[in-house]
Amino acid sequence: MTAGDRVRIGLLGCGNVGAAVARMLHDHAEDIELRSGLRLEVTRVAVRDGARDRDVPVPRERFTTDPREVVDDPDVDVVAEVMGGIEPAHSLILAAFAAGKPVVTANKELLGTFGAELFEAAGRHDVDLLYEASVGGGIPLIRPLLESLAGERIVRVTGIVNGTTNYVLTRMSEDGSSLADAIAEAQSLGYAEADPTADIDGHDAAAKAAILAAIAFDAPVVAGDVYREGIAEVSADDIANARRLGYVLKLLAIAEVVDGGVSVRVHPAMIPSDHPLASVRLSFNAVLIEGERVGELMLFGRGAGGDPTATSVVGDLIEASRNLRHGGRSAGAARARVRPIKPIDELPAQYCIVLRVDDRPGVLAAIAAAFAEHDVSIKSVWQEGHGEEAQLVVVTHRGPERALRACTDALRSLAAVREVSSVIRVEGGEP
Ligand SMILES: NC(=O)c1ccc[n+]([C@@H]2O[C@H](COP(=O)([O-])OP(=O)(O)OC[C@H]3O[C@@H](n4cnc5c(N)ncnc54)[C@H](OP(=O)(O)O)[C@@H]3O)[C@@H](O)[C@H]2O)c1
């Protein structure tokens, strides 16, 4: 082995993902060398707490609490940013590029916000910025989209990209858990953070949706462009109603081309129970890609966890190392094709509206009139009496979102309607 066959890796972070990367590079070193002709070795690691013992095959003297040392070290050829957060990760990646070093990152939050700037900087310095682990953890998604499907026109990408919310919704659906109990259970199993807001409110899924949309549609989409609703309002009744109608409730990230523009959104949705994404349970992730020629394609697997995520980081490290040694750069950047972002109001939608109404003659007629007035056509109505009040579950046909919203507002002001208990979108066709 010559010095040129050895590639020195600097890790920014040695937590769940970073430690798994260090162990995998060590344990699989021979396989990696056989396949790539390169020996990847961790030469420098930055952590916050320098005193903590870590179960990684890296000598202690290679650790530092100053991440800048990793980036600047002449003994580091490729940088893996697995520390998370915006700063200092953002500045460190820019500094690595300026030093001519390729970067591999798992940081969806950073890419979802500063992706365009970082790709531009990587291009200017002619180095790789690879980010397979940022969406779908261990599921290969970015490279299939960027490379295998480079000649295809993608029309829609629909994903379950947040394992915590999928776990919570699965427990609520299958075991009748309440939202609060299911979140507490996800936390005790290590799926959810102590503060689960980023997951429950859909921020994490929105950052991933932005990354996927940017790649699929060559458009500079950022997390702020993504329409977002989380699962905080989802109730056991919503789940029961969905099941009764032949649907399953999921938090979906959807990116699609609509009338020449791009729509990117994250929201809970009822999907038919035989839809390919309906069987994605617990903390698993999956992304359904629809292309003009390829049709439907689904990628399924573990969207989080140190070891699965490390496989994506290590794959990127091998790719970046190959490029460094043999020349060339990988397709990484979202090429800017100006496509307007379609506001949710301009999209077609289908709603399931649950109403608590007075159980007396004439009520159904008044409600039907409100739908007719807003030109919203009803697909099905299901009614259940509860003494003096009844629950009405109305599924609309597909129609303009704006009309559906106006209709829902009108329903709220009807004397016979005690409450609009929930409004959930329906996606993925008929059950
Ligand atoms: N965990 C997953 O399943 C998963 C899946 C996909 C993507 N990701 C992404 O991967 C990244 C890392 O996630 P993780 O779960 O491995 O996080 P983590 O367990 O919290 O690890 C973060 C690591 O970075 C170090 N660190 C943080 N800030 C630092 C600073 N300012 N200076 C020096 N070191 C610093 C921490 O040091 P200490 O150890 O001393 O605290 C720790 O080693 C995030 O961007 C995350 O979104 C994670």
Image (tube, rainbow, N blue to C red):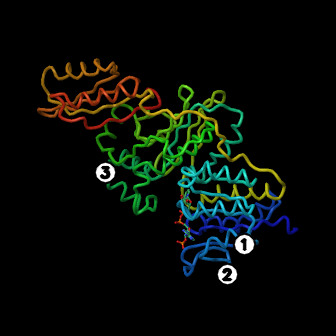
Residue type at tag 1: Asp
Of labels 1 and 2, earlier in sequence is 2
Kindly tell me whether mark 3's CB lies below 8 Å from ligand 1: no
Nearer to us: label 1 or label 2: 1
Q: Is residue 385 above or below residue 78?
A: above
Kindly tell me whether mark 2's CB lies below 8 Å from ligand 1: no
Residue 29 lies left or right of residue 361; in this view the side is right
Of labels 3 and 1, earlier in sequence is 1
Residue type at tag 2: Glu
Find numbered disc 3 in the image and state the secondary structure of the residue it sits on: loop
Q: Which mark is residue 178?
A: 3
Residue hosting label 2: 61
Residue 123 lies left or right of residue 213; in this view the side is right
Q: Which mark is residue 334?
A: none
Of labels 3 and 2, earlier in sequence is 2
Residue 75 lies left or right of residue 108; in this view the side is right
Residue hosting label 1: 73
Q: Quadrant of the C terminus?
A: top left
- Categorize mark 2 by other alpha carbons within 10 Å: few (<14), some (14-19), many (20+): few
